[in-house]
Image (cartoon, rainbow, N blue to C red):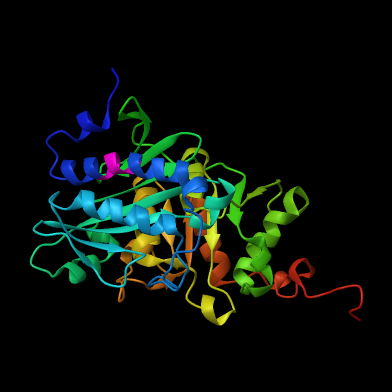
Amino acid sequence: MTETLASVLAGHPLAEPIWVLAKTSMKVAGLIARSPITGGAEIAESAANASGDAPKALDLRAQDLYVAALRGSGISGLASEEAEEVIDLGAGDYVMAMDPIDGSSNIDINAPIGTIFSILPRGELTNEQALLQSGRHVVAAGFVLFGPSTVLVLSIGEGTDIYAFADGDYVRIHRAIEIPEDAHEYAVNASNARHWGPGVTAYVADLVAGEIGPRGRDFNMRWLASLVAETYRILLRGGIYLYPADSRPAYAQGRLRLVYEAIPMSFLVEQAGGIGTDGGMRILDRQPVDLHEKTPFIFGSKSKVERVCRYLDDPPVQHEASPLFKNRGLLRS
């Protein structure tokens, strides 16, 4: 029997806001499809968003669609990566954090992008206080991936399910998915290698060494520069994603956003048997202090993330001066 999102959510207290978001995502998909014509890949008039990035026109158009649709859905306040302050949506028992378009730098090359969200209870808190609760208070999280097909990855705290859009609804294609442990793929932006600390340098060096290195097997590197696409692949095929802090001042606290990206993705990954960490503690245990704070982010198969954390705690001595990532060149003596 085919299970649809509407049937799975029937009677659930979060059915309305999740269904509203899912329906609205199809309008966003239409915006994305027309963006080469409408200029969605162009930089918006505002110089930078609250996170310090230059938003694309599509970022703000998508945000406007979600804000309009979520009013009256039971969400009292929306924190968006593109907005400085929490957006008041009226009465409601829940708040939502959202990255309207994750990976918007990929718009102009037609690579995968998506919408990320998490939902938290408001209780007696203000909207902002509720949004700054730790990830252990999240009651639902998910993302919509706009790729060759449009899929919704969703958890309401009972495992992580995957739905594919078809005929006006989302059809469940994976129920309570488990991240595979035995995988040979890793995702990292290797162009940043010269800025990494010794733990990450040593870990990646061992992966690059392959079957002749200490790991005794070959690994494949993947890097899509799209968090939603990387997460989707890891949920299906296993592996690990690394975006560590590094030596550059702007990246000393990492690159990704704790509230809008790391917390919802960690919720999904942990519901699927994996781990999300900043390298020192679980992301879901982190207490946000600001809506737009950044964090290092490492997630994926449990055993692989635990291995990275061991490297970070105690980098192998033999890699401290590893030639793999050493500054060198033809004219260097």
Q: Is residue 83 above or below residue 240?
A: below
Q: Is residue 24 magenta?
A: yes
Q: Is residue 291 left or right of residue 129?
A: right
> Which of 291/21 is in front?
21
Question: Residue 248: where, in percent of width, then height?
Answer: 59, 79
| Chief secondary structure of the magenta portion | helix
Q: Quadrant of the N terminus?
A: top left
Question: Residue 214: where, in percent of width, then height?
Answer: 71, 56
Quarter of the figure with residue 146: top left
> Which of 222/82 is in front?
82
Q: Is residue 256 magenta?
A: no
| Number of marks in the rendered image | 0
> Which of 135/211 is in front?
135
Question: Residue 206: where, in percent of width, then height?
Answer: 69, 58
Q: Is residue 221 above or below residue 9?
A: below
Q: Is residue 214 visible?
A: no
Question: Residue 164: where, in percent of width, then height?
Answer: 38, 32
> Which of 324/14 is in front?
14
Q: Is residue 271 left or right of residue 183?
A: left
Q: Is residue 88 above or below residue 166?
A: below
Q: Is residue 138 visible?
A: yes
- Who's the residue at 46% across and 41% down the image? 33
**Residue range of the region highlighted in magenta in the rendering:** 21-25
Single out the residue that lies furthest toward the front. Answer: 37
Q: Quadrant of the C terminus?
A: bottom right
- Who's the residue at 8% across and 58% down the image? 91
- Who's the residue at 24% across and 68% down the image? 86
Single out the residue that lies furthest toward the top. Answer: 1
